[in-house]
Image (tube, rainbow, N blue to C red):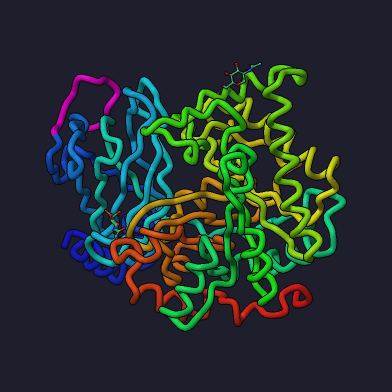
Amino acid sequence: MVGTLKSLLCGAVALAIGAHAAPSCSAGNTARTFEAENAILSGTTVDTAQSGYTGTGYVTGFDQATDKVTFTVPSTTTRLYDLTIRVAAIYGDKRTTLILNNGASSEVFFAAGTTFVDVAAGQVLLNQGSNTIDLVNNWGWYLIDSITVKPSSPRPAHQINASPVNAAANSDAKALYKYLRSIYGKKILSGQQDLSWANWIAQQTGKTPALVSVDLMDYSPSRVERGTVGTSVEEAITHANRGGIVSVLWHWNAPTGLYDTDAHKWWSGFYTDATDFNVATALADTTNANYTLLIRDIDAIAVQLKRLQTAGVPVLFRPLHEAEGKWFWWGAQGAEPCKKLWGILYDRLTNYHGINNLLWVWNSLAADWYPGDATVDILAADVYAQGNGPMSTQYNQLIDLGKDKKLIAASEVGAAPLPDQLQAYEAHWLWFAVWGDTFINNESWNSLANLKTIYGSDYVLTLDEIQGWKTAA
Ligand SMILES: *[C@@H]1O[C@H](CO)[C@@H](O)[C@H](O)[C@H]1NC(C)=O
Ligand SMILES: *[C@@H]1O[C@H](CO)[C@@H](O)[C@H](O)[C@H]1NC(C)=O
């Protein structure tokens, strides 16, 4: 309502006095701030105890799952805006769920701090007229002062590096890199975790994902000792043989120190809370027994990656994923030991084992966790947010992290992104891969109607559409 009035008024003034009126009609081009204390509060309250707020207060009391603040934001046209949230995360690292117009949701991370700060919260595509932006509890216990929207500048051309970081990358890896670079910014590869779920999608939508992601988990020596038999290399080769692209992650079961209790079984031994294995101690000197075990495990995985190399399968390799979350042991001791382990992995696989079919996918967003440009080909985020949105917050964070020189992928998602949203937001994810059971087959994450829209879209590449990619680029 407000937006409509304003644009009518603006239009009338502009007509009456022509170009000179432009500055007074620039509501659509300048930053606009909306105070939280003037928004609609649900289960939340206005407070003033923490100094440094703007306006007459801030909103707090996010302690129940449904607690939220709803901003009403008019726009004179349908267009993209950069969104900033002014927040104080005085109780530690926090996350909020951002919901636009009761539809797509995304997560925004608030780093712990003692004062109010402006946090870039990605972009929002506002409709002409009135819009709502909800900030919903999620981790809760943060203080929201205001939000600011500013029209986004068009995304500049990407500056993607011309070749893989490994100078000895083999022809398969180089061909994959070249192909990925050729489609980046133009299309997205459809992808799915696990071959069986990829085949399930084919049954549901008539289209097979272009990319299949598999897990080396069951080749971890501490699982093999307990009887696991990995099959994911065979699955990867099956998908590659039908012309598909393969991504590999590794839920690395801790080499030793598994609790193996009823609450923390041996097979959950990649979780921080299932092991007392300490990566920092293990890496502290190269002669201790646990360092040796790490190398033993890397060598075991090298055997599997070599099978893929021999089979002519280039691999989007994503070890040490989600490290910054600290829920996996490789991230549990902070950024430094994790980066060190990444360096050891890269060196051991590349230089010692001569595995050159890999493109290296780094999977944390935070700058202080980044192992550096020299060992990373692709940046990736794992995003579990409902609503089939474009995940532009994470995309833009990764653009910043890689200075737009690295390809960017949505390596794990709960909800597959809708192509019209991806294009409107210029969120140029190279691929998305939906997690398997309880996500891909779950209507609250991916309705069949949305899957059909996604798999039927021209913007989304499916297996049939990437045939011959090795020689296409
Ligand atoms: C190796 O790790 C295990 C499991 O955490 C631990 O009990 C042991 O003390 C470690 N060994 C050394 C030499 O640090
Ligand atoms: C579907 O997803 C919802 C939301 O995450 C979850 O609560 C529910 O358990 C899931 N259903 C199934 C059958 O996995």
- The quarter of the image holding the C terminus is bottom right
Ligand 1: which quarter? top right
Give the dominant element type of the magenta stretch: helix, strand or loop.
loop
Nearer to me, 404 or 458? 458
The quarter holding residue 352 reads top right
Nearer to me, 229 or 360? 229
How many marks overall?
A: 0
The quarter holding residue 205 reads bottom left
The quarter holding residue 127 reads bottom left
Is residue 379 something that shows in the picture?
no
What percent of the width, then of the height, locates residue 83?
38, 48
In the image, what residue occupies the spot 62% across and 65% down?
Answer: 235
Is residue 318 part of the magenta span, yes or no? no
Is residue 48 part of the magenta span, yes or no? yes
In the image: residue 214, left or right of residue 169? left
Nearer to me, 80 or 166? 166
- The quarter of the image holding the N terminus is bottom left
Is residue 255 something that shows in the picture?
yes
In the image, what residue occupies the spot 67% across and 80% down?
Answer: 467
Q: Give the range drawn in magenta.
A: 45-55
What percent of the width, then of the height, locates residue 304?
72, 52
In the image, what residue occupies the spot 57% across and 56% down?
Answer: 409
Nearer to me, 222 or 83? 222
In the image: residue 249, left or right of residue 61? right
In the image: residue 189, left or right of residue 456? right
What percent of the width, then of the height, locates residue 66?
18, 45
